[in-house]
Amino acid sequence: MATTLRPGTNERFAQWWQLRSQKERISLAIAAGIVAIALAWVALWRPLTSDIARLSQQVATQRLALAEAQRQANDIANLSSKAAVPAPRDARADVEAALNRQGLKPTAIDRIDNDRLRVSFDAVSFDALTELFDRLQRDARLRAVDATITARVEPGQVRAELILTP
């Protein structure tokens, strides 16, 4: 039993190529070159040029955005340098005013240093104390940095010592 081997693709192409005349080979080579150039143009050149145009437009847009951001940053810097410095307030007077508005009587109001005040209560309603915190923060721009609050025997009443600072 005899078997015949079929020639491979390369061998068949070589045989087919050898059967063509010189003019046919040149024509086929030129056609293959034109197809290769067309494929390179479609697959490489067109996307490359369209990306360049798109990126150039994005760069122009981003430059405008950067210029606007720099202008706004300069405006902010100018505003902050021209902002009026608030006059120093008397924290003790603000605390006393807030206490009077709420009708609270502290045991003592002592100045610890230039920035901090100690306010002590022997007995104060816890609800009134939380409202005082809110009022001092909102109206006098004072906040508690330390608070010692101890429950008393009477319901809702506490002993409190507050350290306030601007």
Image (tube, rainbow, N blue to C red):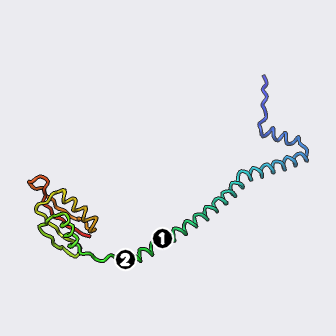
Q: Helix or strand or loop: what does disc 1 sit on?
A: helix
Location of residue 13 in the rendering, given as x and y in whole percent from the top left corner: 81, 40
Q: Residue 107, located in which quarter of the rendered image?
A: bottom left
Residue drawn where x is 85% and y is 42% of the image: 17
In contact (CB < 8 Å): disc 2 and disc 1: no
Residue positioned 83% across, 48% down in the render: 31
Position of residue 52 relative to residue 77, above or below, is above
Give coordinates of residue 102: x percent, y percent.
Answer: 19, 63
Q: Which residue position is annotated with label 2?
A: 84
Left or right? Give the position of 85 relative to 147.
right
136 or 71, which lies in front? 136
Element carrying mark 2: loop
Residue most extreme to the top: 1
Tell me the kind of residue under disc 1.
Ala
What amino acid does circle 2 point to?
A: Ala
Q: Which mark is residue 24?
A: none
Say which mark, if any, is on residue 73: 1
Residue at position x 28%, y 64% in the image: 138
Q: Is residue 155 left or right of residue 6?
A: left
Q: Residues within 10 Å of mark 2 (few under 14, many from 20)?
A: few
